[in-house]
Image (tube, rainbow, N blue to C red):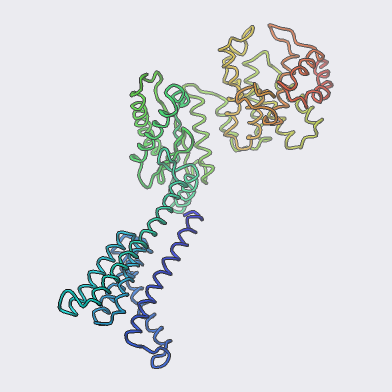
Amino acid sequence: MRPWEHKRATEISEYIVVTHISCLLLFLMIVFSFYNVPLGTIFPIFPIIVFVVSALGTIVYTARKILPKILPLGQSRLDEILLLLVIYPLTFTFLWLSHNFYGAKVLLLVPAIIAATAFGKVAGTIGGILATALLFFFDYRLFHSFPFPSEVFQADVIVGSVIILLSWLTGGLMEVERGVQQALVQLADYDQLTGLYNHRCLQERLMLSIKEAQEKAQPLTVVLLDIDQFKYFNAVYGYQKGDEILAAIGKLLLQEIGPPYYAARYANDEFALVFPGKKKEEALSVAAKLKEKIAQEATLCLLDTREPPCKPFTLTMGSASFPEDADAALPVIRAAENDLFRAKSSQGKARLYQSILSEICALKVKEAFPTLQTLVALINAKDRYTYGHSERVMSYSLALAEKLNLSVEDKDALRYGAYLHDLGKIEIESSLLNKDGPLTKEEWEIMKTHPLWGSELLRPLIFFQKIALILRYHHENYNGSGYPDGLKGENIPLLARIVRLADSFDAMTTDRPYRKGLTFEQASEELRQGAGTLYDPKLVEVFLEAVKEVYEDEKTA
């Protein structure tokens, strides 16, 4: 139970307890009034309280031990049932014994109100009707005739009506409160489209599940299911159809996965399955069957469209286990994400860089950078025309960073981000990277995906998040005309704006098969012309001043 939920439940339970105590005090007041007990004189109040408390304590203690074995209810409900079992007989017994003491009739309100607060409007109303019926029955036995004397009959009608109305009102208010509390829980814990647990609730439940697995020395496996090319289905069939598919998947998972296992919507088109007590092999076997059923269900959703799907509906799985892969909730999820990422990126082909990334996923940047140089070497091997490009872009970027007096942390991020800025080109075919001549429109669209690929490659690496932003945004233009996200002005991270300048400058001044590289002066003029449109106008002149010496050293080396 979350803190806000616990607080709300505690507050309402306090009101219920106060209501019950008030009812009991009313009961005692009428009993003492009937017997005309002069408390404090003939009967000292302290011994009476001690006797009553001791007697009730004994009854309650005995019942609390016995009832849980008979009724599978929570302790709070058992306490309320126990209270009703005690108060109903006492009330009716006292009414029977009190005969014509009309003030005792108010006592019938006590069990009705307790029933209403405990079990809601219907139970309270039924309790009130039952109490009213017994009230008329007692008077019938007293007067041996019907109708009763008018004053008695009027009193019974008024008291009965008040009892029924107050029971209905009290029970209704309690149901409204419990309904609001349940609605808040639903909003806080469940995804509204699929009906599954949401991302936040998954994190909380997973922590509790892993704690329990640790205490019981049992395994636990998390399986992530990701819909392949879900953007394609949204684009072709519309987002409403995409929502229908997600809702159908959620419904299927709710039907197929029961306690102690559970499912959650982890992200837009990703689902998490948690299998407490199952090892990875067992969980993957279950998940594989679910994967087939999900694909069939989604395909059925698509078949009712005017255009049948031209691409098969498929999913990719990633998994991680406790304690095999990690020993806490967040690392387990991270390991499952990495496994999913490797599966999606290497479908149908073995990739060296995936194994490299999996080995360094928990390393800090400085520890992992030497290994990442292997990836840059792979890019250089694929793209002969950009050999040495990453090193030069890094040098130019750091020269500008010195001029701007950036922090050590920013300089480190810039160093690695500039060096790795073309990491996504590892996903581009060598024939395209090494094409002699300008790219076609289609080829250019493929080339423009490399910032996304680069940032996605680094996304699973814990300590590379700031660097991943450089990779994603180093082709954004200052006027918003760049790619992949069309960011504008200072919405583009500063480090990415720096790499944008350094990358362009090196591309201009490097020889290509289809053109000769520009001189420093020519490249400087190009950058000045692009200030305010392609490049940050505040950085251009500072950049040219900073890189002039570095550029000359590069040329003479």
Residue 170 found in image quarter:
bottom left
Q: Residue 237 appears in which quarter of the rendering?
A: top left
- Is 65 drawn above or below residue 191 in the view shown? below
Q: Is residue 440 visible?
A: yes
* Left or right side of 139 for 552: right
The residue at 18%/76% (across/down) is 140
Q: Residue furthest front?
A: 150
Disc tally is 0
Percent position of residue 243, x then y: 42, 32
Foreground of the two, 261 or 150? 150
Q: Position of residue 209 (x, y in %)?
A: 45, 49
Rendered-image quadrant of the C terminus = top right
**Would you say 289 lies left or right of 190 here?**
left
In this view, the residue farthest toward the left is 145
Q: Quadrant of residue 379?
A: top right
Residue 495, percent across and down?
Answer: 71, 30
The residue at the point 59 percent across, 14 percent down is 444
- Considering only vertical position in the picture, is 464 above or below 187? above
Towards the viewer: 46 or 360:
46
One can see residue 86 in this view: no
Coordinates of residue 76 in the picture (x, y in percent) = 38, 64
